[in-house]
Image (cartoon, rainbow, N blue to C red):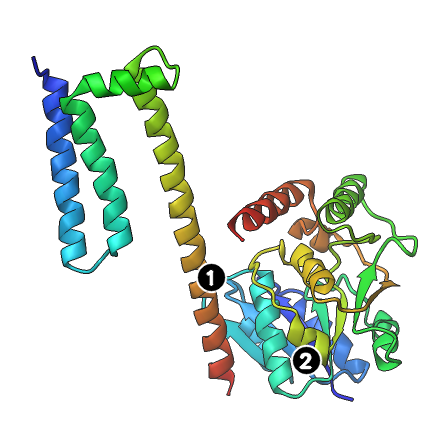
Amino acid sequence: MKLFIVIAAFNEGKSISKVIKDLRSHNYNNIVVVDDGSKDNTYSEIKKQKVHALRHIINRGQGASLQTGIDYALKQGADIIITFDADGQHRVEDIPEMIKPIINNECDATLGSRFLRKTKMPFFRKLTLKIAVLMIFITFGIRMTDAHNGFRAFSRDAAQKIKITSDRMEHASQIIEEIHKKRIKYKEIPVIIRYTEETLKHGHGSFIQGIRVLARTFIRKILE
Amino acid sequence: MITIIQIILILFAVFAWSRAGLRIKDKEIGVGEFAFWSVIWIGVIIFASLPGILEWISKIFGIARPTDFAVYIGIIVLFYLVFRAYVNLDKQSKEITRLVREIAIKKKK
């Protein structure tokens, strides 16, 4: 079974090598890294590693990068695709649990949840993520515990069905919408997110970003 | 008697309409878009030269002052144009993303 790890990286020069080395030390060798037009040394760092290095010539956002990586992995014959963050907040140790239900044909997609296990996180981040969960429930009627976790696994079939057209951070809600619309069987898996100063600096899941994501999702809904 | 503002409005509308005409001649816009701009600018010419019509229409809509009616219409048209510009921008942004993504995959081959 061909497992591919897709990583979208934007200005992650400091952490990307460590993340790749960590994955490779656990024998995950099919790693696709999409440098999303970084201004730092991310691309040169990726090129030093034994990975499939792709590059967006200009920055297009995490959603666009993930779709590029997924398309590439599918072309390489991936059976299972994992989306993994470039800043080191996901644990490689959680990968086996993420892919197990897909290998056992229990479902076609697994979504990491930081709320199924006790994870220490700043109050405002927790509040923002819970609001996102509520919005997902109001908009799509899907009950989830964590709506914006970048740790996901898809079977080949699910990866082919899911089309990410939201370039920026709102892709996370779109993926859930796609899963719902295309009736892809999914399961939430408890994962631990490592919050470091570096990951918190990026603002993934920050309150302001949450508002931005909400506004963009709303506009996308109007335009559809 | 025709006022200066009416003359300015008519001249501007004629100028803007002629620009739309030039753009359809150069095939930069389609028939639909030309028709839209024609309605707008012909409307401006009619209302500017015959303000009585505007007064009559505004009364039908229950708006006391014709100028208020003109401002309301102007705001609605502007909202529509901003929305259209946003849709176009969004479309172009998606095209750029598609291009960037394709280049990334093709370069890797």
Query: Residue at the spot x=65%, y=58% of the render?
Result: A174
Image quarter hosting the N terminus of chain A: bottom right
Q: Secondary structure at mark 1?
A: helix
In the drawing, does residue A115 fall left or right of residue B70? right
- Which amino acid, by three-letter code, is at mark 2? Ile
From the viewer's perspective, is A188 left or right of A4? right
Q: Is residue B107 above or below residue A220?
A: below
Residue A117 placement, left or right of B19: right
Label 1 sits on residue: B94
Measured as percent of width and height from the top left, residue A178 is found at: 68, 63
Q: Is residue A189 visible?
A: yes
At x 76%, y 69%, the residue is: A184
Binning the other alpha carbons within 10 Å of mark 2 as few (below 14), some (14 to 19) or many (20 upward) gives many
Instruction: Name the spot of residue A147 as percent of width and height, x first.
Output: 76, 54
Disc 2: which residue: A31
What is the number of the mark on residue A140? none
Q: Is residue A135 left or right of residue A208?
A: right
Do marks 1 and 2 share a chain?
no
Q: Total number of numbered labels?
A: 2
Where residue A9 appears, as percent x and y from the top left, is: 61, 66
* Chain under numbered label 2: A
Q: Residue at x 66, y 88 (%)?
A: A77
Q: CA distance from mark 1 to mark 2?
A: 26 Å
Q: Chain of mark 1?
A: B
Rendering coords of residue A48 (x, y %): 60, 81
Q: Tell us which disc is closer to us: 1 or 2.
A: 1
